[in-house]
Image (spheres, helix red, strand yellow):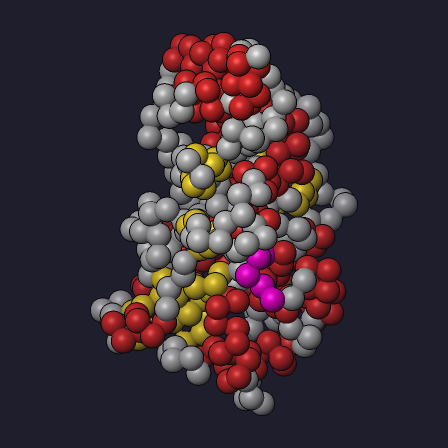
Amino acid sequence: MKPVVSWLGTKCEHCIKCLKSCPADAISIVNHEVQIDEEKCIHCDVCIKECPARVLKVHGVHMNETMHQHDYNVVLIPTSILSDMKSYEDFQRMCEAILKLGFDAVEQYSDIEGFLYKKAIDESHKREGIWLTSFCPTINQLIEKNYPTLYERILPYDYPVEIAARRIRKKHQGKDVGIYSLCECVGKMILAKEPFGNEKSAIDYAMTISHVFPKMNKLKSDIKYPIQMNKYGVKSNVEDLFGNRSLSVVRVEGLNQSKSLLDLVEFDRIQHVDLVAMYACYQGCIGGYYLWSNPFEGCYNIESMMEHYNAENIDLEENEYLIQRELNRQEIKSMKERMAWFARVNEILDTLPQYDCGACGFANCRSLAQSIAKGDVDIQACRVKRKGDRE
């Protein structure tokens, strides 16, 4: 896959906020340049939010350059977009405005989300142990890269937007269809073929909602697009609405809280729980970086429209939603190799001051030790040690 977050560099203040805020320790500053380790990056957009100079950016797709390439263009809208609407009628008018951007159809996938929401709750009660559910690519990458022992505990369901895209292709079989996904976060953007080269995807292009919102707003009129949303799918997008108190479900939002809970699950410290539902963003998907409202009002907006979510429930065949999860590692080391690697890193770490000051250009001393162990930098990158050696 192509690099996702780009460093523009020209106005970088070298304030190290990006590397200090990164929850995956994927950022370093070497030779005054910000470098992002794609093997560690979980595409959470935290660094983008924290950068005061706005020199970290994710590039999207421009419709004007792609829509003419297909005979029929379909846009998939995320359920979380409801959080930015004051009424259901306003939502339908906005969908009509999206259509006027040049699309032939506007499609939703809340009914697929609703099916998987109910399936997750039902199946987790029947399976032994604690199961994890997340349709957030960021959370799934966090588990894959930092908690590989728990990766097989993620319920084996594909992303709803991918399922929707495949269903659209089947519906329009024989027609040259271009499928666009409007995205509320960076994580969902990486699912598409473009702009980051995920060739396995059924989605052609990913665009941020914030990029097209000004155009949508100008095109909005009194005409309403006849679109219906499924209430269970809506619930699956909001942390506050997922499950209820009578179910053995733990809901957690935010990367720090998710990491804390995964630590407990990994060491068998969570009891009497069947299912853990996780979201990278505050309040769930409605906290996505590319939504233009805020999740505080968003939760209220979504709940206030609950009586309008009348899309029927659907049933999916197993071959439509079940997937085989495999660790996507370039190199899966044996336990002996892993222990040797950790021993080498710890040996180097013991020689460092362990102040985690960030002056070396790494988030903490362990990240520096790992880079030294890989041969990317020299131990003299540690300014504190360098000064101590001179004295």
> Residue at position x 54%, y 48% from top?
13
Instruction: Looking at the picture, tell me which residue is in the foreground, 277 or 11.
Output: 11
The residue positioned farthest toward the bottom in the image shown: 222
Q: Position of residue 114 (x, y in %)?
A: 56, 57
Instruction: Looking at the picture, tell me which residue is in the foreground, 221 or 125.
Output: 221
Q: Position of residue 25 (x, y in %)?
A: 52, 33
Instruction: Looking at the picture, tell me which residue is in the foreground, 289 or 229.
Output: 289
Range covered by the magenta-colored residues? 288-292
Asked if 183 appears above or below 322 in the picture, the reply is below
Q: Is residue 265 magenta?
A: no
Helix, strand or loop: magenta stretch: loop
Which quarter of the figure is the N terminus placed in? top left
The residue positioned farthest toward the left in the image shown: 174
Figure label count: 0
Relative side of 39 to 213, left or right? left
Q: Position of residue 347 (x, y in %)?
A: 49, 9
The residue positioned farthest toward the right in the image shown: 245
Q: Position of residue 26 (x, y in %)?
A: 48, 36
> Residue at position x 42%, y 10% from top?
340
Residue 309 in sight here: yes
